[in-house]
């Protein structure tokens, strides 16, 4: 069975299984529309599926995925394409989500590319290089941190520090800032460890990640 055949079989299993068992809920969701309370910004990485690792159902999460789960800084006027910002605007202003989670993860290829020869230069690495330079500040921070003695430790620290940059960028969107100040929206930084399968939560006052749950 090739990859597409496997996917089609998976869809048949979904229809006969989950869809069949949840037909009423899914049809209702289709008729009424979505009203998720949580938006998640996640990496495109195939190993990090926000719905899968939180056992969420269709309709629960508004998921925005991009390379390395980054939030671009707010810009007042835009003449280019801003997929993530547009999705955020829809989540906050139309759906009125109550939480936004920036979900980072270990062994992120996007963050690693910042440390490759071409990724760290102004011209390098095409679309990915230009996109990743959004968190170049995190790369510079870890390169000058004497407590990080190996490249792997620096990359790992950069994965986590870039989440703080995205949270800071989120607070720069006027409609996000307003809803936070009105107590209608909370933002969170989470980190998925992949190999241990655990989720960590960023404590912004301590600049440290702690396990989300026992
Ligand atoms: Zn990634």
Image (tube, grey):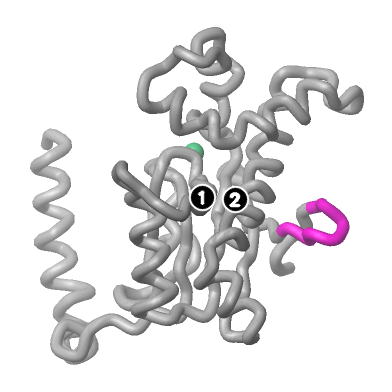
Which quadrant is home to the N terminus?
top left
Asked whether, in this view, residue 72 is left or right of residue 204, the answer is left
Using the image, determine if residue 11 lies above or below residue 119: below
Residue 117 location, quadrant: top right
Q: Is residue 88 left or right of residue 29?
A: right
In the rendered structure, find residue 122 and report the number of the disc placed on it: none
- State the residue at coordinates (15%, 48%): 7
Left/right placement of residue 185 relative to residue 125 reads right
Q: CA distance from mark 2 to mark 1?
A: 5 Å
Q: Are marks 2 and 1 in contact (CB under 8 Å)?
A: yes
**Counting other residues with Cα less than 10 Å from the Cα at mark 2, is it few (<14), some (14-19), or many (20 or more)?**
many
Is residue 211 in sight in this rendering?
Answer: yes
Hey, which quadrant is residue 172 in on the image? bottom right
205 falls in the magenta region:
yes
Q: For numbered disc 2, what is the local secondary structure?
A: helix
User: Does 177 lie within the magenta span?
Assistant: no
Observer-nearest of 185 and 107: 185
Q: Residue at x 64, y 38 (%)?
A: 159
Which residue is labeled 1 in the image? Answer: 71
- Residue 208 vertical position relative to residue 127 in the rendered view, above or below: below
Q: Which residues are magenta?
A: 202-208
Q: Which mark is residue 166?
A: 2
Where's residue 199, x and y in %?
A: 63, 57
| Residue 198 appearing in the image | no
Q: What x and y, as percent, mark residue 145?
A: 86, 26
């Amino acid at each position: 069975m090739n990859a597409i055949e496997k996917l089609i079989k998976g869809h048949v299993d979904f229809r006969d299984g989950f869809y069949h068992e949840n037909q009423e809920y899914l049809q209702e969701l289709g008729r009424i529309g979505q009203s998720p309370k949580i938006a998640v910004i996640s990496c495109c990485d195939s190993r990090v599926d926000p719905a899968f690792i939180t056992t969420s159902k269709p309709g629960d999460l508004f998921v925005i995925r991009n390379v390395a789960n980054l939030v671009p800084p707010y810009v007042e006027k835009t003449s280019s394409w801003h997929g993530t910002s547009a999705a955020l605007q829809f989540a906050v202003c139309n759906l009125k989500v109550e939480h936004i989670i920036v979900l980072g993860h270990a062994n992120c290829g996007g963050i690693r590319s910042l440390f490759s020869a071409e990724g760290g230069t102004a011209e390098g690495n095409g679309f990915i290089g230009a996109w990743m330079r959004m968190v170049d500040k995190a790369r510079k921070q870890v390169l000058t941190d004497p407590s990080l003695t190996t490249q792997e430790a620096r990359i790992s620290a950069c994965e986590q520090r870039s989440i703080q940059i995205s949270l800071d960028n989120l607070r720069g969107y006027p409609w996000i800032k307003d809803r936070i100040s009105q107590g209608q929206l909370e933002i969170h930084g989470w980190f998925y460890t992949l190999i241990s399968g655990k989720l960590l939560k960023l404590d912004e006052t301590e600049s440290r990640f702690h396990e989300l749950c026992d």
